[in-house]
């Protein structure tokens, strides 16, 4: 008795008409490219942080040049950027900077953008656009916050994501439809 897998292949291959011809190994170069060694090694010159910034840029469909420009225009983030470049004070007296000062050992600059770990610190003028992109699939508060936490950060981000989800007409209609309440 023939195995069922062999029967399936026999049925699939029976629709084709082909001739089988033996070709000697030294005459068959079909496998040559997979076995040839590279003559030169590829140098990856892009640091991992820049590669990640490009990944975030692609994932959220934004241009880091826009983020860089808006970071310089944002009075708070431009101050944070100058502290990253020139050194942080021993203590923070400005209340708006307190959240950034608490993370000052983890903040760094990459291509003119401020990064916190692997998260892009978003300037105020870009936050609405980021919120719209994060909330576009209408996944709900929990998943939207998780998505935001994966790529971006700003002071008050979680509250902003919650507010965007609660104010969304599409999400409200889905909740009403799921619960059956008018």
Image (cartoon, grey):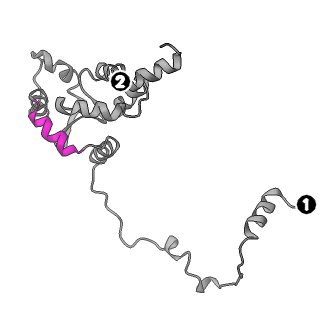
Looking at the image, which is closer to me, 115 or 146?
146
**Residues drawn in magenta:** 63-74
Camera-nearest label, 2 or 1:
2
The quarter of the picture where residue 159 lies is top left
**Is residue 96 something one can see in this rendering?**
yes
From the viewer's perspective, is 97 left or right of 52? left
In percent of the image, x 52 and y 72: which residue is there?
35
Seen at 73% across and 70% down, the residue is: 15
**Residue placed most toward the observer, 161 or 98:** 161
Residue under numbered circle 1 = 1
Find residue 149 and name its label.
Answer: none
Relative horizontal placement of residue 15, taking residue 36 as reference (left or right):
right
Residue 21 x %, y %: 70, 84
Specify whether residue 116 is in view: no
Instruction: Return the residue at label 2.
Output: 168
Is 116 above or below relative to 4?
above
């Amino acid at each position: 008795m023939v195995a069922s897998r062999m029967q399936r292949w026999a049925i699939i291959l029976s629709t084709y008409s082909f001739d089988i011809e033996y070709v000697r190994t030294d005459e068959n170069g079909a496998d040559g490219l997979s076995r040839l060694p590279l003559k030169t090694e590829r140098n990856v010159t892009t640091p991992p942080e820049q590669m990640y910034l490009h990944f975030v840029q692609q994932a959220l469909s934004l241009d880091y040049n826009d983020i860089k420009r808006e970071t310089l225009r944002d009075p708070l983030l431009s101050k944070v950027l100058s502290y990253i470049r020139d050194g942080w004070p021993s203590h923070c007296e400005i209340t708006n900077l307190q959240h950034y000062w608490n993370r000052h050992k983890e903040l760094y600059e990459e291509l003119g953008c401020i990064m916190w770990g692997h998260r892009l610190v978003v300037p105020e003028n870009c936050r609405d656009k980021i919120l719209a992109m994060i909330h576009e699939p209408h996944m709900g508060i929990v998943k939207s916050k998780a998505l935001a936490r994966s790529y971006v950060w700003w002071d008050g981000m979680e509250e902003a994501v919650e507010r965007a989800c609660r104010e969304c007409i599409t999400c409200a209609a889905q909740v009403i439809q799921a619960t059956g309440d008018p």
